[in-house]
Image (cartoon, rainbow, N blue to C red):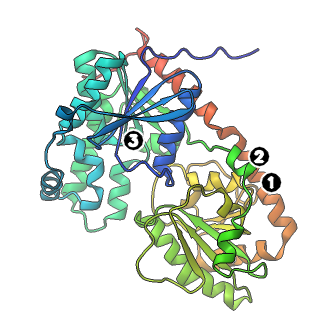
Amino acid sequence: MIDQKPPVPTGGVILVTRADLFPANYGSAVKIDQTALALSRQGCPVRIVTDNRSHYYLYSEGRQTSHAFPAWLRIGPWSRLMRHRLRLKGIPVDEAFIYLPLLDWSITLRAAYVAARTGARVFQAEFPGYALPCIRLRRMFGGCVLLSEHNVEFERVGAQQPALSPQVRDLLRKMEVALCNRADRVVTVSALDRNALVAAGVDAPRTRVIPLGVDIAPFELATRASGFLRQHGIGADRALLVYHGTFRYQPNLKAIRILATEILPRLRARGYEPIVLAVGTHPPLEPLHPDVIFTGAVDTVAPYLKAAAVAVVPLQQGGGTRMKVLDYFAASVPVVSTSKGVEGMGLTDGEQVLIRDGYEAIAEAVALLLSDSSRSRRLAESGRRFVQQFDWSYIAAAHLRLYDECTSPSGTARAG
């Protein structure tokens, strides 16, 4: 029996989020970009409105185009002043992007302009603060609001900002829970995150789990980044480890520092001298280790991942489902990870991944895979089978079913 294709909402979807989406080479940006592309391929146009005051993006039939706002819509409050106001409340400067829409009324105006022109009545927020403009749009036009949670943000911020006062932690929790409870549906990427939000006070009936996806085709077509390796004098005699992400994100920066200062020395003591490819934007200014090579921004991560013998994920912090692990699986690279690095993914140690939490144990597992090609191949093949269920087309279909549920007369679950 073939499942009936979910209906497409009239006018498509307006998605409201942060501006730094492109290049889409970090987890949140990839999630937003690929979900929009996959929805558009299923006949649902997606228009993305961001903090950028000059233009918005249209995703239609698998293509993205940029469209300018009229000059009168490019006005808005001074971003530096808004960041200063957030700082006075105790919110760290590097977390301001999540909460700026609580102060920036111009985002609502730009999204309302798009809604009026298109007839779209499904408003999807990425990150908690962006739910407020969507809630205002619902008040103006009707329709429904979805809040897509990439993490449980108040927990993530608290873990990454140990100096945060208890009062600010409580403020962030209350804001996030209140915004969730004003949305019609709250989407998390794992059951772990869903349960954490419900425990914090979010109404359970509003919540749904839709995991992250992965675009498998580029990994099937990619070949190893031989040109980059030759440019940096990396010969075939040096095994490659890989880790990718944006390194201005503190958990990623901490993870690559662990690789440099803890894992590589332990591997050297065991007789291994691999190179680490650190793939992604915003590398640190200071060198970490002679054998850690930062690529900077790349058009696609696939050739770099395909060049690696082992992916190492020594994450200690962070939230959400680990998109990087899905990428490694799609590239058929065996993975060694901490428990935190695969949290909420439903993986089994020894089947799809080797899960190790101490530095010595991580180094030992990496050495095992470098020395045992059969074990390494079996692990990579198992990871590849696991990732097949996360194709973006399935993720888009899950969103369409949720839009239909949300907009049906019996599906509304608003709290105002």
- The CA span between labels 2 and 3 is 31 Å
Q: Residue at x 52, y 73 (%)?
A: 256
Q: Earlier in the sequence, mark 3 or mark 1?
A: 3
- The quadrant of the rendering that contains the C terminus is top left
In terms of depth relative to the viewer, which is nearer, 198 or 15?
15
Q: Is residue 166 above or below residue 143?
A: below
Is residue 92 rendered to the left or right of residue 61?
left
In terms of depth relative to the viewer, which is nearer, 297 or 353?
297
Which residue position holds label 1? 381
Q: Residue at x 32, y 37 (%)?
A: 55
- The CA span between labels 3 and 1 is 34 Å
Q: Residue at x 51, y 54 (%)?
A: 25
Which residue is the extreme one toward the right?
Answer: 374
Is residue 359 rendered to the left or right of residue 10?
right
Q: Secondary structure at mark 1?
A: helix
Q: Earlier in the sequence, mark 2 or mark 3?
A: 3
Is residue 194 rendered to the left or right of residue 3?
left
Q: Is residue 309 above or below residue 203?
A: below
**Cβ atoms at labels 3 and 1 below 8 Å apart:** no
In x, y percent, where is residue 15? 39, 32
In x, y percent, where is residue 76? 16, 41
Is residue 352 rendered to the left or right of residue 20?
right
- The quadrant of the rendering that contains the N terminus is top right
**Cβ atoms at labels 2 and 3 below 8 Å apart:** no
Please state which amino acid type lies under the numbered disc 2: Arg
Q: Is residue 262 above or below residue 277?
A: below
- The CA span between labels 2 and 1 is 6 Å
Q: How many marks?
A: 3
Q: Splitting the image into 4 quarters, where does residue 357 fall?
A: bottom right
Which residue position holds label 3? 197
Q: Secondary structure at mark 3?
A: helix
Q: Residue at x 73, y 77 (%)?
A: 239
